Image (cartoon, rainbow, N blue to C red):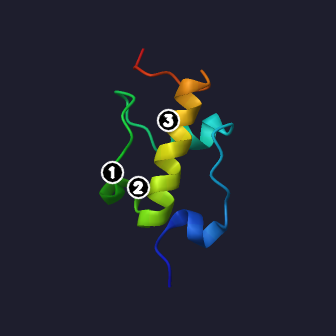
Amino acid sequence: MANCEICKTKKIVDWKNAEYLRSFISEQAKILPRTRTHLCAHHQRRLSKAIKKARFMAVLPFTAR
């Protein structure tokens, strides 16, 4: 039985889905660690890459407001 939310729901991690990615970012605009997100290593890496690409493409901010 998988504990990873993304494995359970079969949700696709995409850099264009800013609302979903924001749930994995702290108030200081830092990517939350696996201990807080409860994702598997595979999806944590994909999530991290998606957040970084979203920041580069100006979909998410680099810093907190």
Image side of residue 58 versus residue 64, left or right: right
**Image location (x, y in percent) of residue 27:** 37, 30
Label 2: which secondary element: helix
User: In this rendering, which labeled residue sits more in front, label 3 or label 2?
Assistant: 3
Place of residue 34 in the rendered image (x, y in percent of width and height, measured from the top left): 35, 57
**Image position of 23 with respect to 3: above or below:** above
* Label placed on residue 33: 1
Counting residues from the start of the chain, the first of labels 3 and 2 encountered is 2
Q: Earlier in the sequence, mark 3 or mark 1?
A: 1
Image quarter where the C terminus lies is top left
Residues at circles 2 and 1 in contact by the CB criterion of under 8 Å = yes
Q: Is residue 43 left or right of residue 18?
A: left
Q: Mark 2 = which residue? A: 37
- Residue 52 marker: 3
Residue plotted at (34% across, 27% down): 28
Q: Say few, some or many: other residues with alpha carbon within 10 Å of mark 3 (under 14 / 14 to 19 / 20 or more).
A: some
User: Which residue is the extreme one toward the top?
Assistant: 65
Going by the numbered disc 3, the residue's amino acid type is Lys
Q: Alpha-carbon neighbours of circle 2 within 10 Å: few (<14), some, or many (≥20)? A: some
Kindly state the secondary structure of the residue where label 1 is placed.
Answer: loop
Which picture quadrant has residue 17? top right
Q: CA distance from mark 2 to mark 1?
A: 6 Å
Local secondary structure at mark 3: helix
Q: Amino acid at mark 1?
A: Pro
Residue 46 lies left or right of residue 38; in this view the side is right
